[in-house]
Image (cartoon, grey):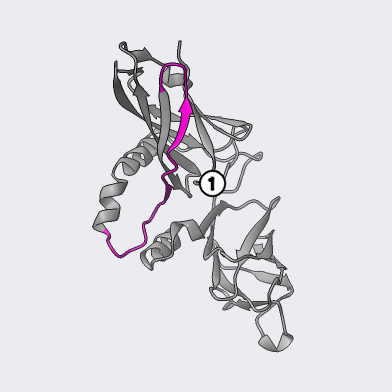
Amino acid sequence: MIVLQALLMLGVRAADIRVYPLDERSVYTIRLGREEPTTCAFPAPLKAIVGANVSASVDDDPGILLSHAPGTEYFSLRRLKDGANGALNVMLRGKVYALAFVAADEPDRAVIFLDEPLADGRTRVPEPGTLQALLERTKQQGREVAARAGMSPALESAKPDTVTLYRNFTATIELIVRFEAEDALVFRIRLENPMDRAVPYDPAGLAVRLDREFFPAALVEASGAIPAQGTGLVYLVITGSPDGGRANLPVRGHYHVIIPHP
């Protein structure tokens, strides 16, 4: 996480950074470009690296150039040829981790591997206090970005203004903020009620839909009623997938909010 914070301070956009828990059963796909390097960082020094179409020597005419100092916990890569793909097997603490590289116009600038291996295919759910802190950071995002004028924002966010129509009210997703390390999305939703009476809803049943998948809220801040001819704000946090693993949900997905109401 120190590496992650350092990259953000150097101006690398949060959108260009990927954070994954270590899992020797997974193959990690990493996007490479020709003009910008991609740095992969691990929680400990690497024992060995074995590659295909990847080399530290330009004389080998590889598709992908590797830069790595023995004994360090990171390496950098850059694509030398158009459309070049490649692969690496990384030996770390007696386990082998498989990386696949693909050509991309918008490469990953940094890939951080966390020292949090998945147990039984599941990841640790953040504590309620952590989720509450993410919610509060989302509330303050506008002020933080203004205070850092000229710097890249440390959070990946989107303002989709996606409207979900209900019989008596509308729900507009005003803001989505992604927190990569926690694998969490925080939504700010504006509810508008044109009726002459208040419209109640159930905060405990709030969820978000992406395509055919539903993600129940892990934390909600909501009043439970939209005032007559008025508006209300709802904040909700989505973390992980319904089966307990990482969801890696994109901040710019086409989401709709599910609001149970009478």
So how many labels did they put on this image? 1
Name the residue: 36% across, 57% down: 153
Taking depth in this image into account, of 123 and 71 the one nearest to the observer is: 123
User: For the N terminus, which image quadrant?
Assistant: bottom left
Q: Quadrant of residue 213?
A: top right
Q: Residues within 10 Å of mark 1 (few under 14, many from 20)?
A: some
Name the residue: 72% across, 69% down: 86
Residue 213 in view (yes/no) = yes
> In the rendered image of this protein, does residue 231 appear above or below residue 118?
above
Q: Is residue 169 left or right of residue 83?
A: left
Seen from this angle, which residue lies furthest right? 52
Q: Position of residue 258 (x, y in %)?
A: 50, 25
> In the rendered image of this protein, does residue 197 appear above or below residue 240?
above
**Which residues are drawn in magenta?**
148-169
Taking depth in this image into account, of 229 and 101 the one nearest to the observer is: 229
Name the residue: 70% across, 71% down: 83
Taking depth in this image into account, of 145 and 173 the one nearest to the observer is: 173
Residue 73 in view (yes/no) = no
Q: Return the residue at label 1.
A: 250
Q: Position of residue 113 (x, y in %)?
A: 55, 57
> In the rendered image of this protein, does residue 7 appear above or below residue 241?
below
Name the residue: 54% across, 38% down: 240
Q: Is residue 106 left or right of residue 81?
A: left
Q: Quadrant of residue 209?
A: top right
- Disc 1 secondary structure class: loop
> Does 157 appear in magenta?
yes
User: For the C terminus, which image quadrant?
Assistant: top left
Q: Amino acid at mark 1?
A: Pro
> Does 115 appear in magenta?
no
